[in-house]
Amino acid sequence: MSTDLQKTLPPYRIKVVESIPLLSREERQRALAEAGYNPFNLRADQITIDLLSDSGTGATSAAQEAGAALGDESYAGARSWFRFHDEVRDLTGYPHILPVHQGRAGERILLSSLLEPGQICLSNTHFDTTHANVALVGAEPRDLPCPEAADLDSAYPFKGNLDLDAVQRTLAGPDGGRVGLVLMTITNNGLGAQPVSMANLEAASALCRRHGVPFFLDGARFAENAWLVGQREPGYGDWTPRQIAARAFQLADGCVVSLKKDGLSAIGGFIGLRDEELHAVCEANLIATEGFSTYGGLAGHDLERLAQGLREVVEPRYLQARAAATARMARSINKAGVDTVQPPGIHALYLNAGRLLSHLPPHQFPGHALGCQLYLDGAIRCAELGSLYLGGMDDQHRLVAPAPFELVRLAIPRRVYTDTHLGYVAEVLAGIAKHPERVRGYRIVSAPRLLRHFKVRLEPVPDPGPASER
Ligand SMILES: *Cc1c(COP(=O)(O)O)cnc(C)c1O
């Protein structure tokens, strides 16, 4: 027992803290109304627990801040660049590393250099900015997640996998010649934070090699994926997370990585490449748009924090404690009667709002309603992943194609909240789950055409109304 407890103990203590606001019910009601019932419009000083994103929201370590003090801000060839470069190269094995200020900058540079208009990019699931960057090139992003991903409740350990049969059929079919890239997102952020198995990566890599198609990783959560592989995939129990991650990178021709997640830093990213010609094209684009190829839009102190963060993020004790904290939170939430996408991943929990708020039809946005209720009852902020974000709408903002699931994502920042904070979130949810029928639906007041969820404004529907009303 005590050794088990020790294993999941966070391997750090807190050195610097930041106060978090507490608001009265009236203040929360007013704040949400003024935000147009869209949590994206809330100010950070109106939020007690912020689970909107795990991106750039982690806490840095004393060692990272000590490194930052040594940041070398030379325009070219800074010492900090070489420390960062060597760390990334040792981890990934790629001969060419290009720094970028965040993941999507890497996506823009890589995808515009690699893809041509009319080509197809296949993925287990494109992250939203990846999707947008493929589309901006004039290419077509196509998601081929494994069929197991569609069952939110099953315990299948690798629901992040790519549907290899579907990839094989596409490559051998009439569209085969148009496939310009296969891009695997590890873990699959768009689909419940589910991991990808090494067997799936190996098979995808071999398939791409046979068809002469480049195979890349979107490795924003490479360390968390490696931890789940070590726990769940036969044959990897004795490997360190770093070894597993290195093997994953080895299977690909290159990668694009947002270091705002597993870089344990507020900003940063990189592109890793084997191909020299592609590197030259990307490097020219990088210098023209991000910065010289030894800083890529990052300061020397950022590169230092990242070099150290990349060491800390693959520490087994850190990953084990983080995975255990997420799993504990999932258990409390499930015990309170709220279902989450199973099995729990690491960086986020996905609440099944459609099931909890079954009295709300999709056009009243049950996921959004649950997110708003978490704010109204506990000043907790999170993100909807349902019909408001993914659904199809007509010109009057009426929902014409609901999303397949009505989910809410509770993203968990790294090294930021204690069990007490996460327990508080579970308690507030348990309170909602006692009387889910009191949660009202929402309707859209105004919405922009593009990237709707960021700027949409809504209002509560006074009465749930009959399900047939559209
Ligand atoms: C965050 C993220 C990105 C984009 O990275 P940014 O640093 O936010 O620009 C790309 N892919 C995945 C899977 C991500 O989670």
Image (cartoon, rainbow, N blue to C red):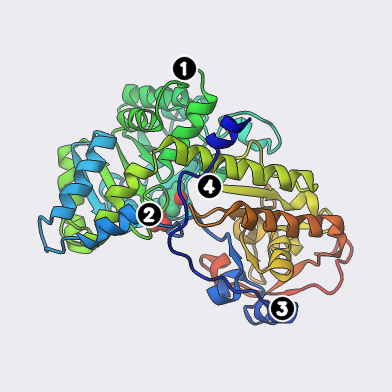
Most foreground residue, 76 or 141: 76
Residue marked by disc 3:
24
Kindly identify which numbered label has been placed on residue 235: 1
* Residue 439: % across, % down: 81, 64
Kindly identify which numbered label has been placed on residue 347: 4
Q: In the image, which is nearer the foreground, mark 3 or mark 1? A: 3
Secondary structure beneath disc 3? loop
Disc 3 to disc 1, C-alpha distance: 52 Å
The three-letter amino acid code for the residue at tag 1 is Gly
Q: Quadrant of residue 460?
A: bottom right
Secondary structure beneath disc 1? loop
Secondary structure beneath disc 2? loop
On the question of residue 77 being in view, the answer is yes
Q: Quadrant of residue 145?
A: top right
The three-letter amino acid code for the residue at tag 3 is Ser
* Residue 147: % across, % down: 61, 31
